[in-house]
Image (cartoon, grey):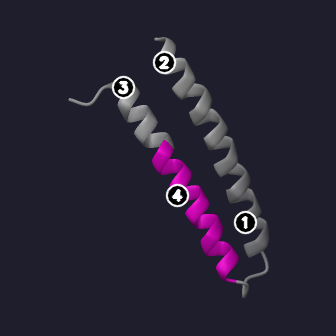
Amino acid sequence: MISLKAFHIFFITMSVFLTIGYGAYELSDYTKNGSVLLASLSFIAGLGLVIYGVKVFQKFKTI
């Protein structure tokens, strides 16, 4: 059985890859008008998830 800590770190990591990957996909497709906006929002969300992940990882070290 996987621990809650390990699952949380895994889930945050996969979420970061998904948001950054979606942002890269949107940047590669310039035919849509909102693609740059969606890419920017995705990269901002990815950055927020990275910051959250670092804080959670530091918190898990103390637990």
Nearest to N terminus: mark 3 or mark 4: 3
Return the residue nearer the eye: 54 or 40: 54
Alpha carbon of mark 2 to alpha carbon of mark 1: how far?
34 Å
Residue farthest left in this picture: 1
- For the point 73% across and 74% down, which residue is it? 35
Q: Nearer the viewer, mark 2 or mark 4?
A: 2
Whether pointer 2 and pointer 4 mark residues with C-beta atoms closer than 8 Å, the reply is: no
Which residue type does callout 2 highlight? Lys
Q: Position of residue 31 (x, y in %)?
A: 72, 88
Q: Secondary structure at mark 4?
A: helix
The circle on residue 18 is: 4
Q: Nearer the viewer, mark 1 or mark 3?
A: 3
Q: Is residue 42 above or below residue 61?
A: below
Circle 3: is it few (<14), some (14-19), or many (20+) Cα within 10 Å? Answer: few
Q: Position of residue 20 (x, y in %)?
A: 60, 59
The circle on residue 61 is: 2
Report how many numbered discs are placed on residues in the image: 4
Alpha carbon of mark 3 to alpha carbon of mark 4: how far?
21 Å
Q: Nearer the viewer, mark 1 or mark 4?
A: 4
Q: Secondary structure at mark 1?
A: helix
Q: Is residue 35 above or below residue 30?
A: above
Q: Secondary structure at mark 2?
A: helix
Q: Position of residue 25 (x, y in %)?
A: 60, 74
Alpha carbon of mark 2 to alpha carbon of mark 4: how far?
25 Å
Q: Secondary structure at mark 3?
A: helix
Query: In this figure, which residue is indicated by the disc labeled 1?
Result: 38
Query: In this figure, which residue is indicated by the disc labeled 3?
Result: 4
- Magenta region, residue range: 13-29
Whether pointer 1 and pointer 4 mark residues with C-beta atoms closer than 8 Å, the reply is: no
